[in-house]
Structure formats: C-alpha cells, structure tokens
Amino acid sequence: MPAIFMAVTVLGIFFLAFRYYSKYLAEHVYALDPDRVTPAHRFEDGTDFVPTNKHVLLGHHFTSVAGAAPIVGPAIAVIWGWLPALVWVVLGTVFAAGAHDFGALVVSVRNKGQNIGTLTTSVINKRARTLFLTIIFFLITLVNGVFSVIIGNLFIAYPGAVIPIFFEIPLALWIGSYIRKKGTSALALSLIGVGLLYVAILVGQEIPIEIDGLASFFGIGPRTLWILIMFGYIWIAAQLPVWMLMQPRDYINSHQLVIAIGAVFLGIIIGADKIVAPAIHNAPGGSPSWFPFLFITIACGAVSGFHCLVCSGTSSKQLDNEKDARTVGYLGVLGEGSLALCSILAVTAGVGSRALWNENYQSFDLASNMNLSYFVNGIAHFIGHLGPSESLGAIFAAVIVISFAATSLDTSVRLQRYVIQEVAEIAGRHRLNKNVMGATSVAVLLGIGMALLPGGGEKGYAFGRLWQLFGTTNQLMAGLALSVIGVWVIKQKRNPLAIVIPLVFLLTMTSWALLENLKNLIDERDWVLAPMDALIFGCALWLIVEATRAFWQTWSANKLEEQTEQQPVPSA
C-alpha cells in the first residue's frame, strides 16, 4: 500500500474529528463559557499563572505531552502489524485522548487550576485524592527517570544533535524575554528561531560533541554524565517563569513538528514509498499478547494519563480564555496522534524492504531496544528523498525526539514539584510547601535516583525494569482521570457517555495488563516489581470503587432532583 494513502486518510480523519467531534464536546459535554474568568487571570503571578495566547499555549502543551513516548510506543506495536497499531492510534486519539485531555483541562480550569489529584477531593472524596496522588507521584518519578535515560542514549548515538539542542536554550530565553519586553508577536520570532535551529543542525553535523573523555575523568559512563547534565539544566529551568523559557522553546518545537510532518509527506511522495510491513503479523515467540498489551504499548499517541497532569498542572494555569480549551486540549492530542502516525510510517515504510523489516522485528526485545533507531533511520530515509544526506536527516530526526523528550522532562519535573509541595502541605511540612527551590531539588534528586538505580542491564533499571510498569500505570492514570471527569460532567447534569465508554475500556485493559504483569513478575520471582505492581493495582481498584460510588451518588441525586421538580405544586 502507498504510504501517502495512509497519511492522507489519517490526517483527514483528524481534521473531521476536530471540526465536528471536538465541537460536540465543547458545546454539549464541557459547555465552554468564554465569559468565565480563568485561573490564569484570577491568580496571575507572572511565574506559573500567566495568561497566554492560545497558539503559544498549544505549542507548550503539545510538546510537553508528546515527548518520546508517541514515537516509542507505535514503533514497538507494529510488531503485531501496522493495522491494529494504526486503528488504536486513530480511535484512541479521536475518542479517548480527545475527551481525556480536553476534559482534564476544562475541569482544572473550573477548579482554580488545581491538578487532577487535588481536585479529586471535591469531585470524589479525600480518600481518592490520597490514592490518586500516590499513583501520580510514582508515574512522574518514572517518567523523569525514563526520559532522561532516553535523552542520554540519543546524545551518545547522535552526537551531532548536541549543539542544536543546547543552542535552543539561549535562543528560547532571548525570544521569551524579547516578547515579554516588547509585547510583539511570538509567531515571527519563533519561525526565526526554527531557522536558526536548523543552522545549528548543520553546525552539529560538522562538530559532533562526545563526552567520553570527560566522563572517564569523573569515573562514570557517558550516559550517566549526560543524565546529570540534563538534570542540572532542568533544576534551573523548572524554577523559571513559564514565559521565559518553557513557552518560547515549546513554540519553536511545535513548529518543528509541522515542518517534520511536511518533510515526511513530501519525502514519501517523491520517493513513492510503500508500506512494507504486514497489516497483521503473528508476533514472534516471547512477545506478549496484543490484547491487552497493544493498548498499553501505545499510550502517548493514543491516550496517556501523563497528559492529564500537564493539562491540570501547567496548561490550565495559562489558559487565557475558556473557549481556547478546545484548541489546546483537543488539537494538542491530534498533533500527538500525527507524531504517532509519523512513527508508524517511519518503521513500516521508511525501512525500505520487507526483508529488513522482518530482521528488525524478529523479536519483541529487539523491537523494544531499537525502536528509536528505527524511527530516526526511517525519517532520515524520507528526508534523503528531498536532497539532504541521510546522516543529516538522522540528526534532524534525533533533534526532534530529544527536543520533545527534554520538554516533557522539564514539564514533568515542574509537575513533580507541585505534587511534592502538595504532599508537604498535607503532611504539615509548610516550609517545603512554600519552598520552590527545595521542592524542585527533591524532584530532581528523585529523577536522578530513578535514572541511575543499578540493575536492568545495559538499559539501566528505569528503562530495563521499571518500564514494564510505565505503560500500565500511564493508562491506568488516564482511566482514573476520566472517572474524575465523568463524575464532574454528571454533576453538571450533562451526558457522560463520551467519557464513560473510553473510561470503561481503559480501566478494563489496564487492570487486565496489571494482573498479567503481576503473574509474570511472580513467576520471575521479582520481589521488587511484583509488590509495586500489586500496590498500583490495589490503589486502582480502590479508586475504581470510590469513583463508582461517586458516579452512582451523583446520578441518583440528579434523578431525585428531576423527580422533585416534576412533581405538581399543591394548590393553596
């Protein structure tokens, strides 16, 4: 099948989804009110609560939720065939992620910009808040460790990406400060920034940066040193006002996606690339069953619990007008779905031949270990049709992956800081609750510890062992967030069906996967991950019970109120 047919079909579906389905959600499920004052205005502080143009905020939101996961998941999941992977990306993006991200953003905006864990108290109850915060804390710590490992590995594999990635930092600082001072449009400056970034890619190709010698001097490995360098940068970035670095850098990165998609499609047309992978594939022995693990392997790129943390953690604090939630919340997930589409195209059409695809996907472990390389090589193949060398195309693709991963890491550490401050408040540790530097330091140290924990072979403990729980925990978070959104929608006396259907599906798949993982971990006698899996599953069951009770109580109260209103008023 021609690859361009897949691309045009999926983007056409995404266009129709935004045009019609997101409008339905905006008007009939979430009932957006453009006259309502948003938390960004009510609590404006110049640091976290900052009213932001919807296009700039869309850039921040999209690049924060994207990271490397919408590339990694689809690039692994095609081992079951491109058709089930593509169907889940499309349906998951349009119906599950669209309702999830859009809803989490709106519910947070309607509750003073509170994160999803905090507002669980008012929507469900205090017990649910504690359970939710427990799962959030684990998920964010895992994300911080895993994404830093991904960045370290990519810097080692593609040293030409180092200069453009670090050049983007002062570039974004300059753009953010200039816009803040002059009040000028962000679009023109960010486009200039993208152009300068691409010049830096050319420089990076000529001057690759390797730190093996410096790492040897300190007696550590190069990946460890890159992880420490990244967390040093993140420690500073997570404390800066969002307008200074995060917003302008994310806006630049959002343009990168548009350019990358355009380059991929143009390359596919010129090269007349075809899908060489099978539509349905019997995965080799040792692979997990595609049902339920397909829906766990592709998390970001279909629906992801991490998104609700970004929606309610940073994006809700920057929303200028409530009607902008449709653009930021729904269009943002369509952007991520488009990135997942690019990943599928890269590893099924960019690979070149069926024989090479069979070699790449001869085992699940090989696909899991090499997925980012498959993606980068596939994108480089498409870029090669346009004239540049494939080596330059590989650096271009690596810069995209690292940029998104670094943005997610920055946002994730900032979110972890919020969680730590909230936990400190609950525990009565008011000094830590008010100390931004102290809470950020704790978040960074937790991330470093997770990334450098010994074990797990060459991939490290975070990626080699804990990654097994990432997908299930992430999708579980999405299901639990949908339960909070669903209860809130019922309380507003609106139809919750658009939330309930993906909610039931996700909780079923994740609970099933957690049980399968628990059985495997016990068989492997892994007495570290098995109790952790059991703890997460127990918290999930408890939250499901609490959410179900809240659903029933709210629904019953609404019915009773309707019956009371319908009773005739007795005559005097």
Image (cartoon, rainbow, N blue to C red):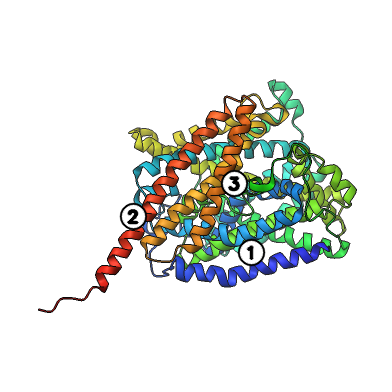
The single residue placed furthest to the bottom in the displayed view is 571
- Choose the circle earlier in sequence order: 3 or 2: 3
Is the Cβ of the residue at disc 2 closer than 8 Å to that at disc 1?
Answer: no
**Distance in Å between CA atoms under marks 3 and 2:** 37 Å
- Choose the circle earlier in sequence order: 2 or 1: 1
State the SS at label 1: helix
Give the foreground label among 2 and 1.
2
Pointer 2 residue: 553
For the residue pair 158 and 346, the one nearer the viewer reads as: 346
Pointer 3 residue: 408
Q: Looking at the image, can residue 339 be seen?
A: yes
Asked if residue 344 lies left or right of residue 528, the reply is right
Q: Quadrant of residue 551?
A: bottom left
Pointer 1 residue: 188
Is the Cβ of the residue at disc 3 closer than 8 Å to that at disc 1?
Answer: no
**Distance in Å between CA atoms under marks 3 and 1:** 24 Å
- Quarter holding the C terminus is bottom left
- Quarter holding the N terminus is bottom right
Give the foreground label among 3 and 2.
2
In this figure, what is the number of numbered marks? 3
The amino acid type of the residue labelled 2 equals: Gln
The amino acid type of the residue labelled 1 equals: Ala
- Choose the circle earlier in sequence order: 3 or 1: 1
